[in-house]
Image (cartoon, helix red, strand yellow):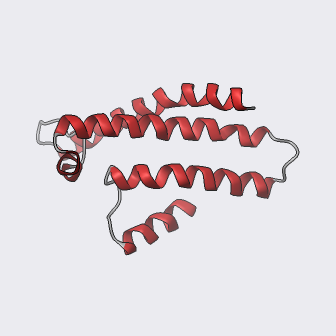
Amino acid sequence: MIKEIIKRFLIGAPIGFALSTFITVIISIAIGDGNFHPVVPQMEIDFGSELNAVIAQMLFSFLYGGAFAGASVIWENDDWSLLRKTVTHLIIVSVCTFPVAYFCHWMGHNLISVVSYFAIFFM
């Protein structure tokens, strides 16, 4: 099972990065000022430069994609109930998603934003 998780993680990581890059292109097009916006401006401040922020977002995107892909093995465990699979998957992706969303500034950094984030995520 561990071997399969690692295999899926390694497949999902570049997919997460590709999706993240695609999303930044779409956001840049939507902003419409002719510039590429690879990261949220606050991330540049937090990481000291645009390059550092882009590298951090790249690493977070690898983690994000890999975690989702690796967690997919849960659904193949026939010994677990659907409820246990669902809760376990939700916990794993929540634990991986929250820090990525927080450090990449995909959500606000206050209590209301955190609560809203989890409410939306759980829905």
Figure quadrant of residue 115: bottom left
Q: Is residue 123 visible?
A: no
Toward the right, the furthest residue is 79
Q: Is residue 55 above or below residue 117?
A: above
Q: Residue furthest bottom?
A: 112
The quarter of the rendered structure image containing the C terminus is bottom right
- Residue drawn at point x = 32 percent, y = 65 percent: 109
Residue for point 55% across, 26% down: 10
Left or right of 105, for residue 64: right
- In which quarter of the view is residue 57 placed? top left
Res 106 seen here: yes
Residue 90 image offset from top left, x and y in percent: 63, 55
* Residue at point 34%, 52% (across, down): 103
Q: Is residue 20 left or right of residue 122?
A: left
Question: Where is 1 relative to 28, above or below?
Answer: above
Labels in figure, total: 0
User: Which residue is depicted at the point 40% across and 29% down?
Assistant: 18
Rendering coords of residue 16 (x, y %)? 46, 34
**Residue in the foreground of this view, choosing between 109 and 81:** 109
Relative to 28, 6 lies left or right = right
Pick the quarter of the image with the N terminus. Answer: top right
Q: Position of residue 17 (x, y in %)?
A: 41, 32
